[in-house]
């Protein structure tokens, strides 16, 4: 169970560097689980969890990072998702969402990722 499931970074400057947010959670399931992966919906977003093996009552932090200068993003507010994959698989996979809008103060020529990519 997450204390919050969405976070809005607001407008982030392309030149501002990577931004991050911590999502606090508590495991409320009956059976122990292991977090085996933390996939994100885009290469510009990374995530890691503080505690990968959980039993009922354990608390942890999911740290999500977003790079506003990796590649082109939508021109208005957009979101990225982060999912916790567990073993055994939970009935409903925990997921959080980050929102942002990028201020292209450096311009598209400054993107770190130059080649075409597929998220």
Image: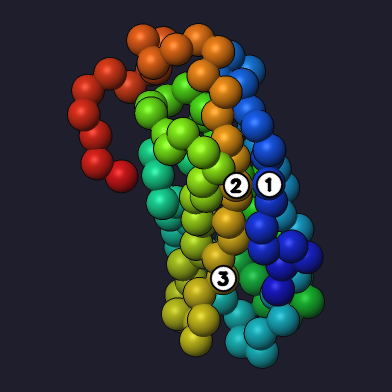
Q: Secondary structure at mark 2?
A: strand
Provide the residue designation for mark 3.
94
The answer to whether residue 106 is above or below residue 98 is above
* Residue 8, label in figure: 1
The answer to whether residue 64 is visible is: yes
Classify mark 3: helix, strand or loop. loop
Up-down: is 38 above or below 99? below
Measuring from the top left, give residue 54's x and y in whole percent: 65, 71
Q: Are marks 2 and 3 in contact (CB under 8 Å)?
A: no
Mark 3–mark 1 CB contact (< 8 Å): no
For mark 2, does the 10 Å Cα neighbourhood hold few (<14), some (14 to 19), or many (20 or more) residues?
A: some
Q: CA distance from mark 3 to mark 1?
A: 18 Å
Q: Which residue is rendered at x = 63% and y = 28% of the image?
A: 12
* Count of residue discs: 3
Give the alpha-carbon distance from disc 2 to disc 3, as whole Å.
17 Å
Residue 95 sits in which quadrant? bottom right
Q: Secondary structure at mark 1?
A: strand
Residue 70's image quarter?
top left
- Distance from label 2 to label 1 (Cα)? 4 Å
- Labelled disc at residue 99: 2
**Which numbered disc, 3 or 1, marks the residue closer to the eye?**
1
């Amino acid at each position: 169970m997450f204390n919050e499931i969405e976070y809005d970074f607001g407008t982030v400057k392309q030149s501002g560097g990577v931004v991050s947010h911590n999502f606090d959670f508590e495991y409320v399931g009956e059976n122990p689980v292991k977090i085996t992966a933390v996939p994100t919906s885009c290469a510009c977003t990374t995530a890691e969890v503080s505690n990968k093996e959980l039993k009922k009552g354990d608390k942890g932090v999911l740290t999500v990072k977003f790079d506003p200068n990796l590649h082109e993003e939508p021109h208005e507010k957009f979101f990225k998702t982060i999912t916790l994959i567990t073993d055994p698989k939970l009935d409903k996979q925990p997921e959080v969402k980050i929102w942002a809008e990028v201020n292209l103060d450096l311009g598209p020529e400054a993107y770190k990722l130059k080649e075409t990519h597929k998220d």
